[in-house]
Amino acid sequence: MGNGKIVYRESAEPDAAALVALYRAVGWSAAEKPERLRLGLLNSDALVTAWDGERLVGLGNALSDGHLVVYYPHLLVHPDYQGRGIGRRLVERLMARYRGFHQQLLVADGGAVEFYRRCGFERAGGTTPLWIYAGTDH
């Protein structure tokens, strides 16, 4: 464990083991595809990570056309570190990068809905999210 001081990085390239540990801790099935997960995150338009020493404790990423639309597919914080404002700081860093974009989108469920509302997101009109999903964590 680190010193408890969280450091945020936009240039870090976490290895597959660090990503798998974080994704497993939050119960996300993407952990079962470690190399695809790592490559997908590293090929994102933006990736912001949170570190406690050498331990990856949170991350958020963005996919964007670079001009009008940005989608935030992943935001996760290790359960041992939740409730410390790490998620909010990750979202703020990502949103600052895309300030002024026509659409900033994400999909939220469960307890995450209220978290994202506090970050300024609102229900997207009368839309219904649709997907083709190959994961196991519905």
Image: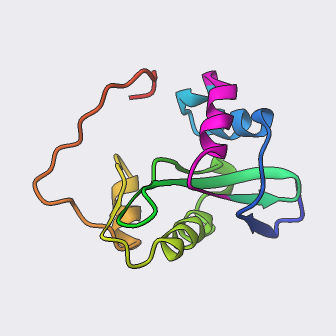
Q: Position of residue 111 (x, y in %)?
A: 38, 52
- The one nearer the camera, 87 or 127, is 127
Q: Position of residue 73 (x, y in %)?
A: 46, 47
Q: Residue at x 42, y 57 (%)?
A: 65
Asked where in the image residue 106 lies, by quadrant, the reply is: bottom left
- The one nearer the camera, 119 or 129, is 129
- The one nearer the camera, 27 or 131, is 131
Q: Residue at x 59, y 71 (%)?
A: 89
- Left or right of 70? Residue 74 is right
Say whether residue 92 is magenta.
no
- Left or right of 133? Residue 136 is right
Q: Position of residue 91 (x, y in %)?
A: 52, 66
Q: Residue at x 67, y 45 (%)?
A: 42
Colour scheme in the image? rainbow
Q: Residue at x 58, y 63 (%)?
A: 83
Instruction: Please count the marks in the image.
Output: 0
Question: Which range is magenta?
Answer: 32-48
Say whether residue 36 is magenta.
yes
Tell me if residue 7 comes above or below residue 82 in the rendering. Answer: below
Tell me if residue 45 comes above or below residue 26 in the rendering. Answer: below
Asked where in the image residue 51 lies, by quadrant, the reply is: bottom right
Q: Quadrant of the C terminus?
A: top left
- Left or right of 136? Residue 76 is right
